[in-house]
Amino acid sequence: MNDKKKDGNVAFKVTYTDSNWSGVCSQDLALKNCAKKDWCIRQSEFIENCQHPKFSNSDNLNKKFSPCFDSIAQKELMFYAGHFHSEDKDGIPKTALDIKKGKIALFTSKEPGSEEIDRFIFAIGRISEVELVKDEYGDFKQYICDKDSAIIFKHKRPKFWKYYTNKNAPTRAAWNSLLFRYIDDALVIQILKDIAFKNRFPGEYRKRAENLLGYINS
């Protein structure tokens, strides 16, 4: 499936953290990310960057206090469309007009050094809140999922590219620059049915997948 049909669902591209997206990266991983990830590079130059002691206690991190969205993506089950980092649009928020409250969000990532084809889904949630945030460059929305009904994968994480294909290059796994992709109901249903009705997933995952299926087209 491709992202041209916009049913309100979304897949987010989340930078890998070795804290299960519930805290900042270790020093070793932070050094690697700060060498090639746009926001990591930018914030690494701050006096109070992600490795500052103020961010060291993951219990204190939340949607109002964190060095990046990646560090709280699983903990808060939230993400956003990103900001531009190009010279002509630096700092301007990106827009995602077709993500809808009540629809499904896939949180995806891949381990450092792995190929894009290895991108996995580490959480699936129903978008329960859409918050408008203002910063010095403009307004943007952050999307928060309901934690009680979400699936958080500790193991046996589904592979994203097993389900998603690029329309113009079906055999190529390439996400490119955006932090999000629209996904249609059919793709979400296929993923949730695989989780709900195949024995390879634990019972709790299967129950939650069946529950989330009930929200599609509701």
Image: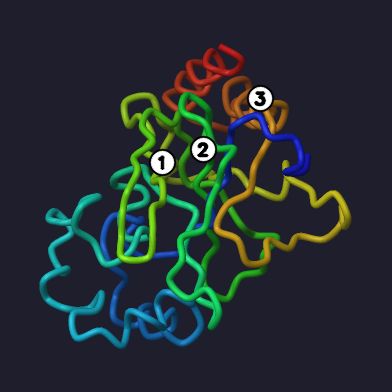
Report the disc number at residue 105. Answer: 2
108 relative position to 116: left or right: left
Looking at the image, do the residues carrying marks 2 and 1 touch, with CB atoms under 8 Å apart? Answer: yes
User: Which image quarter: residue 32?
Assistant: bottom left
Q: Nearer the viewer, residue 44 or 26?
A: 44
The amino acid type of the residue labelled 3 equals Ile
Q: Position of residue 209 (x, y in %)?
A: 52, 23
Q: Nearer the viewer, residue 52 or 152?
A: 52
Q: Position of residue 126 (x, y in %)?
A: 45, 29
- Taking the spot 44% from the left edge, 51% from the top edge, the residue there is 80
Foreground mark, 2 or 1? 1
- Taking the spot 51% from the left edge, 38% from the top edge, the residue there is 105
- Taking the spot 43% from the left edge, 31% from the top edge, the residue there is 127
- Determine which residue is flagged by label 3: 189
152 relative position to 72: left or right: right
SS label for mark 1 = strand
- Taking the spot 27% from the left edge, 67% from the top edge, the residue there is 67
- Determine which residue is flagged by label 1: 143
Q: Taking 177 as reference, is 151 above or below it? A: above
Q: Earlier in the sequence, mark 2 or mark 3?
A: 2
- Disc 2 to disc 3, C-alpha distance: 12 Å
**Could you tell me which quadrant the N terminus lies in?**
top right
SS label for mark 3 = helix
The amino acid type of the residue labelled 1 equals Tyr
The amino acid type of the residue labelled 2 equals Ala
- Disc 2 to disc 1, C-alpha distance: 9 Å
